[in-house]
Amino acid sequence: MSTPNGPASGLPVRMPRPRQPGRHRRPEPAVAPEGAPALVLAVPGTPGPAVRSLAEEIVSIARSELPGLDARIGYLDSEDEEYPTLTAVLAHAAQERTARFEQARAAGQEVAEPDGPVGVVVPLLAGPDNALMRRIRQAVNDSRAAAELTDVLGPHPLLAEALHVRLSEAGLARADRARLFTVATAADGIILATIGGEEAVQAAGITGMLLAARLAVPVMAAALDQEGAVAAIAEQLRGSGSTQLALAPYLIGPEAEEGLLELAVKEANCSAAEALGAYPAIGKLALSAYATTLGIAREPQGAPVR
């Protein structure tokens, strides 16, 4: 099962939660409409076993929230058949739909011509990255398949929650402000590290304000892919009175080049939390982007922040 700590070893198949009996039972979850387009998770970065495990856990979370969901994974940077490219996944989905239509017609069934998207592509990105989004759009175009591309997953209050959990797991923040639980190593200033340049920094700053409200400490965003940016923010926080800094990656993980986070931590001379990874909110936000695109009504997961 998934945990806030990310994917477990030997991933089990997620099953829908059983319906609770009684007058106060929760409403039954929505079910994916028959023949609905696939949710295609667009995964950036170099694919490998760890990245695949993370992506599989995220789509598993999405499937558990919407029974019957057809969820697939397409890798942006793959040259290995073991990790199908986004272009190939979309092209295959289109071929499958055409084959189903032709089989039904050959069997004498009255069926309408296939219409609408074969897939809804959800970028596995917490914040905007124009370079990566251009490449995802190009991969969608290269597939020659009818597909919709959603926005990135953030900013969103659920991402502020995820960042808080990751910091508390590392002993860098109180797990629960309401209980006034103190941590000896708690940071008094947070660097929110993102990638994607200035636009990504501005978007991360919105989630950073939500995180600052949760922790009651200053939070400032910096771009990992801008030379010296993290060190400059660290200096600014220390100049304003923060003495114990922590770096919180505003990243799911695969989108950051190897070694980039480690270098930033060294430059800032501070401790760091883990990336967001397969925190349950990531799967829920991916599904929310898919459902919103198709107009599928679901239980609200918290309002997005724009």
Image (cartoon, rainbow, N blue to C red):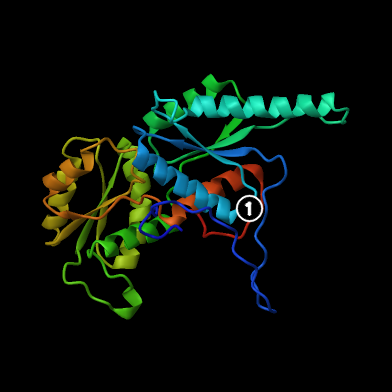
What SS does tag 1 mark?
A: loop
Q: Going 30% across and 38% down the picture, which residue do you hit?
A: 256
Side (left or right) of 293 relative to 109: left
Which residue type does callout 1 highlight?
A: Pro
- Residue drawn at point x = 53 percent, y = 59 percent: 301
Relative vertical location of residue 173 with respect to residue 273 in this rendering, above or below: below
Residue occupying image coordinates x 11% and y 62%: 243
Q: Nearer the viewer, residue 213 or 296?
A: 296
Q: Is residue 46 above or below residue 39?
A: above
The local crowd at label 1, few if under 14, some if 14 to 19, many if 20 or more residues have their Cα within 10 Å, is some
Q: Please name the residue that numbered disc 1 is placed on.
A: 67
**Residue 151 appears in the figure:** yes
Q: Can you tell which quarter of the image residue 280 is in?
A: bottom left
Q: Does 101 sit left or right of 70 as displayed?
A: right
Task: List x then y, in percent, for residue 296.
Answer: 66, 49
Expressed as whole percent of the image width and height from the top left, the position of residue 128 reads 40, 39
